[in-house]
Image (spheres, helix red, strand yellow):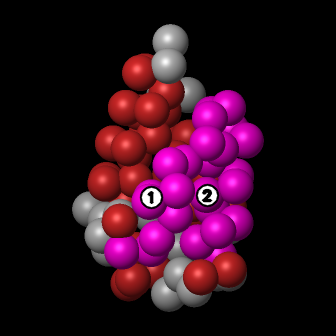
Amino acid sequence: MGAEKKVLQVIKNNLSKEIDVNPQDLLQDLEINSITFIQIIVALESEFDFEFEDEKLLFTEFPTIKDMIDYVINRVEGET
């Protein structure tokens, strides 16, 4: 499974209801609260074996899921 699909799956697994998740989706439209956001961050860190930078632990840093996907891919590829 590619990195983009893994990120989408992690996000989907942490949502309170079953919905389709697409890269173009705005995080705020998915009704993600601060607790869910942190759960997603922790799950992504575990899945991809890296830590988010402190300044990226803010909900506003990732307007869309694509922004989060791009960040994760850049972090993972930058460390290999």
Task: Tell me the amino acid under the disc marked 2.
Answer: Ile
Residue 3's place in the image compared with 77, above or below, is below
In the image, 41: left or right of 61? right
Q: Which residues are magenta?
A: 36-60
Q: Position of residue 32 (x, y in %)?
A: 53, 81
For label 1, the SS is helix
Can the viewer see residue 22 in this picture? no
Q: Position of residue 60 (x, y in %)?
A: 36, 74
Which of discs 2 and 1 lies nearer the camera? The answer is 1
Residue 2 is marked as none
Q: Are marks 2 and 1 in contact (CB under 8 Å)?
A: no
Residue drawn at 57 percent across, 86 percent down: 33
Can the viewer see residue 3 in this picture? yes
- The residue positioned farthest toward the top in the image shown: 80
Q: Nearer the viewer, residue 2 or 40?
A: 40
Residue drawn at 31 percent across, 53 percent down: 66
- Residue at which label 2 appears: 41
Q: Quadrant of residue 42?
A: bottom right
Predominant SS along the magenta part: helix
- Residue at which label 1 appears: 56
Q: Position of residue 10 (x, y in %)?
A: 62, 53
Residue drawn at 59 percent across, 82 percent down: 34
Magenta segment includes 9:
no
Magenta segment includes 40:
yes
In the image, 74: left or right of 20? left
Residue drawn at 73 percent across, 41 percent down: 46
